[in-house]
Image (cartoon, rainbow, N blue to C red):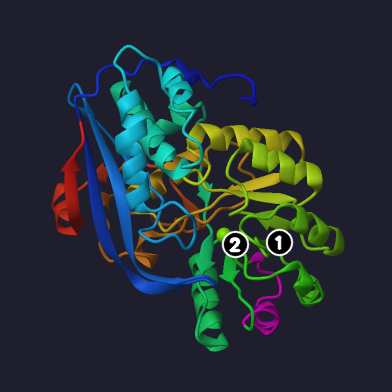
Amino acid sequence: MTAETPHPAEGRRLGPIDRADFITVRLPFVAPFGTSIHTWSVKEALLLRLESGGVVGWGECVADPDPFYASETTTSAAHILRAFLLPCLAADQSLGELLHRIRPVRGNRMAKATLENALLDLLAKREEIPLHALLGFPARPIPSGISLGIQEAIPALLEGVEEAVAKGYHRVKMKIMKGKDVAWVAAVRERFPNLPLMADANGDYRLEDAEHLLKLDAFNLMMIEQPLSYTDIAQHAHLQRRMATPLCLDESIHDLDDALSAVELGACRIINIKQGRVGGLLESLRIASACAERGIHVWSGGMDETGIGRAFNIHLQTAPDFTLPGDTSETSRYFKEDIVAPPVTLDARGFIAVPPGPGIGVTVREDLLEKATLHRERVI
Ligand SMILES: [Mg+2]
């Protein structure tokens, strides 16, 4: 697909939505996940459940309850969905018409992605085809990637990398922050000289730190993700001109226009596409395709999703324009008990199988959902 042509899925008729529910779930993480901005010890997610003619579609909002990774929160997303997005649903419209109707709502892309995800799952299930087929791609084994949070000390980080390598992960991402950067990357690189390794700063540095960041060029990193501010593009372009290591933008990219600006300015050579951050799967495909045309690699980032959001990310990565391993790792790294079956696992070569079956291909386990539910509200 190109940026100009609508995706074929946009032509599908939505039909009547008989019922919509918000379900807020809370799942404790197996271990806290630390970044330069915040440490999360539980996953709290807003789920959207849509029902139409006995078929159920699921969407997961990737926003956290707090505004530390992004400005949207589960509460703000629920408000935008309830007051502005769900009222645009009509039985006699296509998906493309709905997406056009919600365009006047600025920003709030996590809320928009939640609705788009649920509708795509519903449409695929209605046609009894897997989501990747609705998106237009055959299934393929998805290379796994792992994101290791900030640790207390270097030995704990090395232990985490060791485990990831033993498991067969195709690349390892380590979070860095001021004071836990050059020496930490050096320690990992020394122990694992050939490991596909990258670092993610979640915007912890400023352009004045360029001299310090340049030291990371010594470690043959695949990329450094979002070193500078979450709102910036231009300063990343200045930094990229000085650094040999490719920069990758995450937080700065909210849609196709941001991606095109970043690429045109030379602010990065790689983009982390989080489908929930950019408004959904279809915008993700547009960004991936535009990047491929310009020789820019992209990969699918994660937001520590439950099995629902994780399944969307897996289906998205069947698109051949996703050229690098993403953040999708095994469920057991995050949760002792998820709300879906089957969990994500790696095969002996570190690949993830696309769940077969209609829609996202995983089943929401009502018993586990019930256990994890904090709040449930019928909105249609
Ligand atoms: Mg990131």
Q: Which amino acid does label 2 sit on?
A: Arg
Amino acid type at circle 1 is Met
Front-lying residue, 50 or 185: 50
Above or below 27: residue 326: above
Residue at the (49%, 74%) spot, across then down? 163
Say which of 11 and 124 sits in front.
11
Indicate yes or no whether the magenta region holds residue 195: yes
| Part of the protein shown in magenta | 180-199
Ligand 1 in which quarter: bottom right
Residue denoted by label 2: 171
Residues at marks 1 and 2 touching, judged by CB atoms closer than 8 Å: yes
**Residue 170: image location, x then y, percent:** 58, 59
**Does residue 49 sit above or below 251 in this rendering?**
above
Tell me: 120 left or right of 280.
Answer: left
Q: Mark 1 — residue?
A: 222
Residue 353 % position (x, y):
43, 46
Quarter of the figure that contains the N terminus? top right
Marks 1/2: CA–CA distance: 9 Å
Residue at x 69% of width, y 77% of height: 189
The percent position of residue 9, horizontal first and vertical second, equals 46, 21
Image quadrant containing the C terminus? top left
Mark 1 or 2, which is nearer the eye? 1
Q: Is residue 358 visible?
A: no
**Disc 2 element:** loop
Q: Which mark is residue 180?
A: none
Q: Residue at x 59, y 39 (%)?
A: 255
Give 130 or 353, whichever is nearer the viewer.
130
